[in-house]
Image (cartoon, helix red, strand yellow):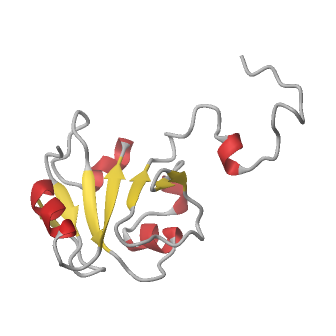
């Protein structure tokens, strides 16, 4: 469990809190939230976070907010981000972030090993192109 976690009660205001408290609040009948897991240097968004623990930030959900708007609200630029995910699916800038989503944010220097081209829609499959994958 995370050493600490950030929470956003107001969609534009950040504060420090303990993860367990906000896990309870997120499941209670409070304002809808988004669970954001941070990796690499993005862990610095949560003061006191450690690389040997999960680093989680809870932010208020904003209706019809795109992934790009969410990361901008968090003060992040596209240049700071690598491959990121919404509920386990590779995130695109225009994806709407649903209430209760689990978002994983990786920094620019942490991307899928193969480049993730099969996830990013390059269009090639083993049947279309003879590629030695190993």
Q: Residue at x 44, y 66 (%)?
A: 71
Query: Is 95 placed above or below 36 here?
Result: below
Q: Is residue 83 left or right of residue 118?
A: left
Q: Residue at x 23, y 80 (%)?
A: 31
The vertical placement of 60 against 120, above or below, is below
Closer to the camera, 107 or 63? 63
x then y, percent, for residue 33:
29, 71
Residue 74: image location, x then y, percent: 37, 68
User: In which quadrant of the rendered view does residue 22 lie?
Assistant: bottom left
Quadrant location, the C terminus? top right
- Quadrant of the image for the N terminus? top left
The residue at 23%/55% (across/down) is 46
Please state if 38 lies on the left or on the right of 15 as rendered. Answer: right
Residue ID at (81%, 37%)? 125
Foreground residue among 113 and 34? 34
Q: Is residue 60 left or right of residue 1?
A: right
Total numbered circles: 0
Image spot of residue 29 (x, y percent):
18, 78
Q: Position of residue 90 (x, y in %)?
A: 56, 52
């Amino acid at each position: 469990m995370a050493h600490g976690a950030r929470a956003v009660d107001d969609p534009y205001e950040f504060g420090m809190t303990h993860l367990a408290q906000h896990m309870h609040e997120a499941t209670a009948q409070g304002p809808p939230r988004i669970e954001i897991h941070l990796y690499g240097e993005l862990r610095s968004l949560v003061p006191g976070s450690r690389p040997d623990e999960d680093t989680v930030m809870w932010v208020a959900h904003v209706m019809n907010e795109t992934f790009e708007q969410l990361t901008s609200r968090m003060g992040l630029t596209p240049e700071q981000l690598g491959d990121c995910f919404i509920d386990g699916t590779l995130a695109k800038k225009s994806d709407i972030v649903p209430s209760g989503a689990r978002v994983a944010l990786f920094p620019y220097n942490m991307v899928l090993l193969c480049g993730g081209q099969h996830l990013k829609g390059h269009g090639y499959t083993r049947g279309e192109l003879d590629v030695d994958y190993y």
